[in-house]
Amino acid sequence: MAKMKAVFARIRLPIFSIKHPETFQVMSCLPIPQPSVLVGALAYCIGTSHGSGLTAYENLKKDIERGEKFTARAKLMDIIVYSSIVLRRFRIADEIRKRTRLYEILARGDIVGGKLFLEKDLMDAFYRGYAMGREILCAWILGENFMIDEGTIRLLQRLGDTESLIAVSDVWIEPIELGAASEIKTSFPFPLGDARVRHGDFTLMKMCNERRLPEQYVIPIRHEVRRTGTGRVMVLEPTEIEVEFPRPTQFCETSMGSIILS
């Protein structure tokens, strides 16, 4: 069996927002980071650590496209809820003509006019969907020769949009071996393909895989409506499911459970 290693990172939230592949902006967010986001997150850590910037992402993308064994997964560690937040932002950086107009107004000494122009023409507001919780777990399954250490992963600052600031609370790397089976228990998401879920709660969602191609994924979570002091709220809770495949499928056994590979 091929030798691999698993890199795990416990992520403290409190919020993150990762758009559905086919929605505008991030008005509707996914319950977990999709594999393509985790590829970008790993590339960011490597690029920051080595000082290679975006080159790290291009190199990682080429490795994946060449067929290097690489799987990225994330799962909930506790319940999360969805909520919308109104973001109010200045558009100075990407509105060159309007920015020039603002400078002209300020150059005339018209501070009040500049303030009004800034708030009326260089600002917008919109709703963005967020997942709110306490902790998620990210996992990268890599070849044994892939050079990475715990300190590099601790450089991760956000998952998803710009406002999705997170904190890495724990990182560890463990050796694993690949196996194959037709029946697997897992709490990690995986591509649906020809799998059949025999037992456990789950949901199906389209997410972008490690190659940034949309796929249907099975996500082991349970939707539940709970009563609070002010009403009712929909919560998502992590689960474990039993999956059956028509033929043996590659997976790896880790300290955090089985991960079905890409």
Image (tube, rainbow, N blue to C red):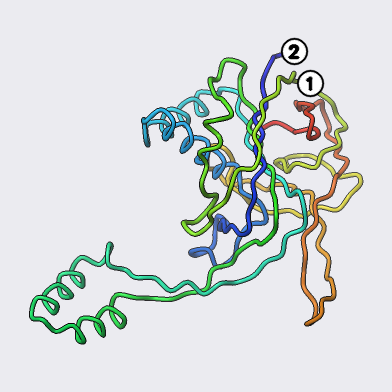
Horizontal side of residue 173 vs 110, given as left or right: right
Instruction: Give the mark count.
Output: 2
Label 1, label 2: how many angstroms apart (C-alpha)? Answer: 7 Å
Q: Secondary structure at mark 2?
A: loop
Q: Is residue 229 left or right of residue 102?
A: right
Say if mark 1 contacts mark 2, CB within 8 Å: yes
Q: Report x, y in % for residue 95.
A: 25, 67
Q: Is 66 situated above or below 53? A: above
Residue at 55%, 49% in the rendered image: 159
| Residue located farthest toward the left when viewing the structure as drawn | 108
Residue 1 image label:
2
Residue 102 place in picture, x, y as percent: 18, 75
Amino acid type for the residue under numbered disc 1:
Gly
Q: Nearer the viewer, residue 238 or 77?
A: 77
Q: Amino acid at mark 2?
A: Met
Which residue occupies the extreme right position in the image?
Answer: 199
Q: Earlier in the sequence, mark 1 or mark 2?
A: 2
Q: Identify the image quadrant of residue 54.
A: top left
| Residue closest to the eye, 205 or 121 | 121
User: For residue 179, which numbered disc appears in the image?
Assistant: 1
Residue under the image location 47 percent in, 74 percent down:
126
Q: Position of residue 124 (x, y in %)?
A: 38, 76
Residue plotted at (57% across, 56% down): 18
Question: On screen, 212 above or below 144?
Answer: below
The residue carrying pointer 1 sits among few (fewer than 14), some (14 to 19) or many (20 or more) residues within 10 Å by Cα, namely: some
In the depicted structure, whether residue 74 falls above or below residue 131 = above
